[in-house]
Image (tube, helix red, strand yellow):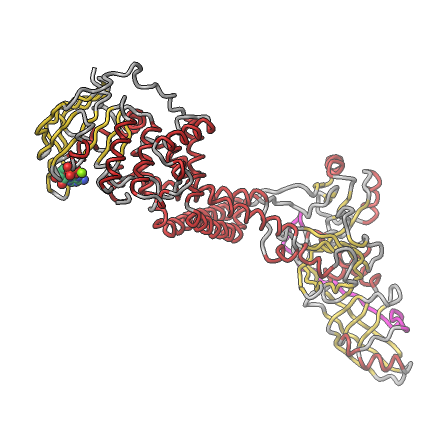
Amino acid sequence: MALLTLKDIGKIYVSEGNVAVGIRGVNLSFDRGEFVAVTGKSGSGKSTLLNVISGMDSYEEGELFIEGETTSHYLQPEWEQYREKYISFIFQDYNIIESFTVLQNVELALLHIENPKERRQRALELIRRVGLASHIRQKGSKLSGGQKQRTVIARALAKDSPIILADEPTGNLDHATSKEIIALLREVSRDKLLIMVTHNFDQVEDCATRHIRIFDGAIEADHVIRKTETAEPATPTAPRSAPGKRRDVKNGLKLGGTIFAAKPKLSCFLAFLMIVGMLGIFAVTTLCGSATDMFDKHYMFHHIDGRVVLAHRDGSPLTDAELLGLQEAHGAVRSLHYDALLDDAYRFGARIGDRYISLSYTYGEDYGTNIVGRYPTAADEVFLYLPIYLQPAAGKDTLLIDTVDLMGSFSAKVVGVAYYFDNNLTARCLFTEEGFRYATAQRYLQDSSTHIEAFYTDTTGAEHQAEIYSFRLSSELAPGKIALAEEGFLSMQKSGKLASLSLQFSATYYRYDYFHDDGEKHMTFSKAFTLDDVDPTSTPSVSEYGKVLMMSPETLTAIAEEALGGTYRQASLFFENDAEAKKAARALQEAGYIAVPSYTEYTPEPGETVLSMVASIFLALIWLLAIVFLAFFINLCSGRALSAFKGDMAIMRSMGIPVRVIRVGMYARMLLSLVPACVLLAVLAVSIFTSPRMNEFFVYLYAWQYAAIYLGMILLTVRITYTQVKRLFGESVKKSLKGGGAA
Ligand code: ADP
Ligand code: MG
């Protein structure tokens, strides 16, 4: 049985409406051990014949048999396998991978040897055999034509395929080198079928066993010149290890590494583009951060471990006595009657160092023991929970700030700070219970519609009237006392001529009702003062405060609680922890109260849900779009540089390297160029987490968001590689070789 048989093979080229005959009516049969010289005029169809035999070109007519088996049903993957098993191709223009070393070029053809050591050894052996021992680590681009062709021969031998096809292998070489190459070819292919196209029959006359002449696509002559030395080898084609998926992937990964290292400049450029892409996705993720709002929990109340919010079912106000009774009966650690400031969405500005930030006010929270300073113990002391970027201003080991102005009207001593990294959070100001009550009083009585009118008389009976602009909390006043910062009043007080005072304080306050919304949100409260309420020792300076009513914290709190007491319907009890809170809430509910642990979430209204969902989907789409855009951009930037690989890929394919290996190699190479970008992002994430400056500048992202960025980048890389692979494999091997080959 012949190794290779062509029966009535015909190949026609159709391009731009022109029909050219490649070959026609070719009937040939070949065996191992033959050295077939093919000659003919230029354009007669010699290359076409080799391309058809190699499976790189299709044929329209006839049939090609390999070891007696028909190939007419072959599709692309079968042809790849066929090439891997049977064919080694040697071109006129060498077609070695210029950026690979001799060793890498040869090893590429030894992928079927799984053991890397064995592979290396075999490669070195072959390189020695073709006389290139001193050029093992030389890059392809630095070799002479003869050396390149030797490399190709070593590569052809490495494959150990039964058929070697050579298309004018000495066409670009000088006479002496040509003779050497032909002798080498003959020597190494004694047990193989060697078909060599040549324009110079004289060169091969000495060693060819058969001469075929082609004219106009048809066989003109077919002579046997001498007997083949070895007719049939003892062993048929060595069975190759099955082309396993795992082996292909392993080889592909290794190939990826080799490609990556072979072109350092291109790899650096790609890595740079990947960094641009990574930063782009990071920026977009930061901008689209609110897309995650959809997954945010909607707490009904500000969550403090152990807190339960309480109200009467009928909406009537709770009394202090009742609350204390409940605290005792249910084993609460403490209680807070006027607790709405905890849940106040209003943020209070405060100056920390040279920065102005928002604070929310809180009470009864614990920030652990990793704090600077201590927790507050007095009413005018506070503890601040600040973003880490304020650490340089507020102090790392010792406290650097001593006071903070709150709500623009009273100043508190800062006794401690703790820091957090998640700069999406709002800073907090932690009070003592008493301090929190003062702050609540301030908050609920201080409104633009506060109205204060003062009438006073002197000892002569003269009446004076003054409009006071606002009120202020002053901790210097004796408990329960007030002072009036108004010029006339103060001078009279100084000279001891004050006879009487009648002062009316009215404030409109906002009513918080979580449980009963009866529409009435604003309540007005009035309080009268007389001369007895004035602290005689306190004489504030007017220039400092303007016309202001000063109140001791106790006075202010008393009026606030008097005001709120009649209407405020909510209170908080604090238990050891949330588990206790849950138990207590159940018991309180059984006792007829509305009792809600502060960890309770609520479902937003459908409209709100839909809106936030639509917004989230929209942002997610923008995120994806940005990735696609970046992929497009990177693809555009790298496209030209990468098409340099087209030739290399075609060479690999012509060598019969499985498409899967090349494909895995391409992906591996791209993912390798992604590594610096990944490292950069990791460094960025860590520095946002550890360096206060970075923490201020960048939005804090959660681990899963970083995971999304990495995923996005991998997606982008896969997308780019996919386009490249498609472009590279879209063209036939032959065309790619012509376009990208080194000719
Ligand atoms: P040779 O190698 O003997 O010089 P070829 O096999 O390359 O000749 O070409 C044989 C014929 O087929 C020529 O007429 C040539 O113009 C035509 N031909 C070869 N390749 C193509 C192609 N890709 N498209 C169209 N015509 C082609
Ligand atoms: Mg040709």
Front in this rendered view, residue 522 or 219: 219
Residue 247 percent location from the top left of the image: 43, 27
Residue at the image point whose x is 11% and y is 38% from the top: 41
Q: Give the side of residue 303 with respect to residue 44, left or right.
A: right
Q: Quadrant of residue 411?
A: bottom right
**Would residue 520 be counted in the magenta stretch?**
yes
Q: Is residue 455 left or right of residue 262?
A: right
- Quadrant placement of the C terminus: top left
Q: Examine the rendered structure and indicate whether residue 46 appears above or below residue 545.
A: above
Foreground residue, 301 or 258? 258
Ligand 1 lies in quarter: top left
Left or right of 497, for residue 13: left
- Residue segment shown in magenta: 514-537
The quadrant where residue 37 appears: top left
Q: Residue at x 27, y 32 (%)?
A: 89
The percent coordinates of residue 101 (x first, y second) are 40, 40
The spot of residue 598 in percent (x, y) is 69, 43
Q: Is residue 186 above or below residue 726?
A: above
